[in-house]
């Protein structure tokens, strides 16, 4: 059994675990990262009307807080980067969509592009995933996937 699929008991009453689990979306029995990214879409839509500066600052806070949130949740259950921890998918998707015109097409392409990069983990994402640990390690490979997806998105939609 892989480390990411180990059965553990999460506590949604814990604010840290509630956030780390993407408001519970990470508890989906199959493809928790995909469900976590899907759960990020409505929150992205709420944030999308903000100025780029404010949006960027909020995403920065989400990323920095995510290091603690993901690290603490992983520590609480004793499993590094458990599949149910999806706060990193929220951050990666928000990065993917930075300054992209909002439409159902851009959201769909951004969603698919981010998920493919997060799953396939091309270089340098794969290096970060293998070498980094703790909350920073949990967050950083998704941040890199989001940045790579963002660059591709700007080629497509700008």
Image (cartoon, grey):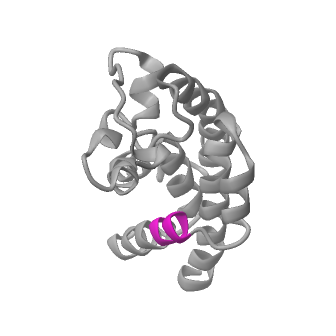
Residues shaded magenta: 115-120
Tell me the residue at 55%/84% (across/down).
156
Locate residue 58 relative to residue 102 in the image: left or right.
Answer: right
Locate residue 43 relative to residue 152 in the image: left or right.
Answer: left
Locate residue 143 relative to residue 70 in the image: left or right.
Answer: right
Nearest the camera: 15 or 105?
Answer: 15
Give the vertical position of 98 relative to 73 (above or below). below
For residue 85, say whether it is visible: yes
Locate residue 92 relative to residue 39 in the image: left or right.
Answer: right
Residue 137 occupies quadrant: top right
Give the vertical position of 77 relative to 33 (above or below). above
In the image, residue 106 lies in the stretch drawn in magenta: no
Residue 149 occupies quadrant: bottom right
Tell me the residue at 37%/53% (across/down).
41
x and y percentages locating residue 40 in the rendered image: 40, 48
Count of numbered badges drawn on the protein: 0
x and y percentages locating residue 100 in the rendered image: 54, 68
Nearest the camera: 17 or 128?
Answer: 128
Nearest the camera: 51 or 155?
Answer: 155
Tell me the residue at 45%/49% (across/down).
2
Quadrant (top left, top right, bottom left, bottom right) of the C terminus: bottom right
x and y percentages locating residue 33 in the rendered image: 40, 53
x and y percentages locating residue 103 in the rendered image: 38, 70
Tell me the residue at 53%/80% (across/down).
157
Outermost residue on the top side: it is 13
């Amino acid at each position: 059994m892989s480390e990411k699929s180990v059965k553990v008991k999460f506590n949604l009453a814990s604010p840290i675990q509630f956030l780390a689990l993407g408001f519970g979306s990470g508890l989906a029995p199959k493809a928790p990262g995909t469900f976590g990214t899907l759960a990020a879409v409505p929150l992205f839509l709420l944030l999308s009307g903000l100025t780029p500066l404010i949006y960027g600052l909020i995403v920065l806070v989400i990323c920095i807080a995510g290091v603690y949130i993901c690290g603490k949740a992983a520590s609480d259950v004793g499993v590094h980067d458990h599949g149910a921890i999806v706060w990193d998918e929220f951050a990666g998707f928000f990065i993917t969509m930075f300054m992209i015109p909002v439409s159902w097409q851009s959201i769909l392409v951004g969603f698919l592009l981010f998920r493919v990069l997060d799953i396939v983990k091309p270089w340098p994402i794969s290096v970060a995933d293998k070498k980094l640990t703790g909350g920073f390690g949990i967050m950083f490979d998704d941040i890199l996937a989001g940045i790579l997806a963002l660059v591709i998105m700007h080629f497509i939609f700008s």
